[in-house]
Amino acid sequence: MTVKTFSLSLTFNPTMERRTNRRGVTEHFVGGRHLKLDDLKEAAQGLETRQYLFRENIPAYPRPEFHVSHLKHDTDLEGLLGIKRDGGFRSLGPESLLWWSLAVKPEDVTSAETRLLEETYPDRTEEQVQTQQSFLGKFTTSPAFLETSRLGSYRFTFPVEEVLEAYREQFCGGEPPVLQVFETVLYKQEVMYVVLVDRPANQQYSSLSDDPNAVCVYRDGRFIWRPEAMCETHSFELVQKPDVNQMELFPCSRHFYVWDHVAIALHVGKGKVLKFHTDQLRGNLKFCDPGEPQLSYFESFADAEEIVGNLWPEYPAQLEKQISLQEMLYPWWELLGFCR
């Protein structure tokens, strides 16, 4: 889907502001910019919640580029019931925003690994390509990639283009929405880069331009995400071997660092609903086990099956569990550290 872009020249002072979100969590943020880690460290000088950000001697890790074609929206039972009742997703809070996150698929990791290797070693031989062992999925250990949820047992996963097309039709009068660089938010161990989706008349921030150095851009129905810190818990070190045009990973002692992710905030207006067909909602719904920290109540899988079955009694398939990204990328013996 086409989206509008504008050139907006603004000068920003990268000083972090402070607020408390609707969950009672303190946030430090910089509006109108997506700050990379070096700039974020500059802006975060003197903050109490900076200990993970300023840790040193972090083992080398990949800096890939993910081309992400799906978005996810996690919710609890109360949210699920509201989504079924309303036929879609309602904004919460005074900011009138509807929140989604990037949903990285196994094929996104595979293609990102190939792209990283081709860009780093453009002169690889066919033998070097064939003998290169997969490594990138072993670094996808932050909550941004996990099958678990911190927000509830229910995850809706939609194609990016379907979400933006629904927004265009329902909130933009058929005009392409504008995607804007909204803010960078810093928590104790988490960095959130927020993209604002809004009506064309509401351009307030710089557009999400196709900048090769940006953390996140939009192109051809995909969000292109270049993570600054993709691991959270670092258990491997990336080793580049230019003599054979390959990359390897080696186990190392665990290091804890910040992790980053991209959130997509759709401005829909207070209490407004982004609507989808009921079968579309059910078809894109899966069950999630709880992650850490838990920010909501979670049902057991058996209870969730019964609840979802009662809400969509005529839907022909059973509720499925969200499967681990690493389970889809690697055989079980590799994940357990065994040799084949």
Image (spheres, rainbow, N blue to C red):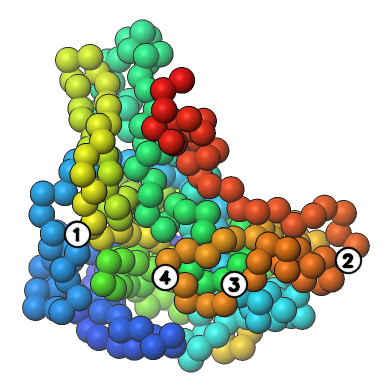
Extreme residue in the right direction: 314
Q: CB under 8 Å between callouts 4 and 1?
A: no
N-terminal of the pair, mark 2 or mark 4, is 4
Q: CA distance from mark 4 to mark 3?
A: 12 Å
Q: Secondary structure at mark 3?
A: loop
Type of the residue with mark 2: Pro
Disc 4 and disc 1: Cα gap in Å? 23 Å
Gap between marks 3 and 1, in whole Å? 33 Å
Vertical arrangement, residue 338 with respect to residue 150, above or below? above
| Residue that carries the numbered disc 3 in the rendered image | 298
- Res 175 visible: no
Amino acid residing under circle 3? Phe
To which residue does mark 4 refer? 293
Disc with the residue nearer the chain's start (1 vs 2)? 1
Q: Nearer the viewer, residue 12 or 100?
A: 100
**How far across and how far down the image is residue 219, in percent?**
46, 49
Sequence order check: which comes first, mark 3 or mark 2?
3
Tag shown at residue 37: 1
The picture places residue 267, in percent across and down from the top left corner, at 51, 78
Disc 2 target residue: 313
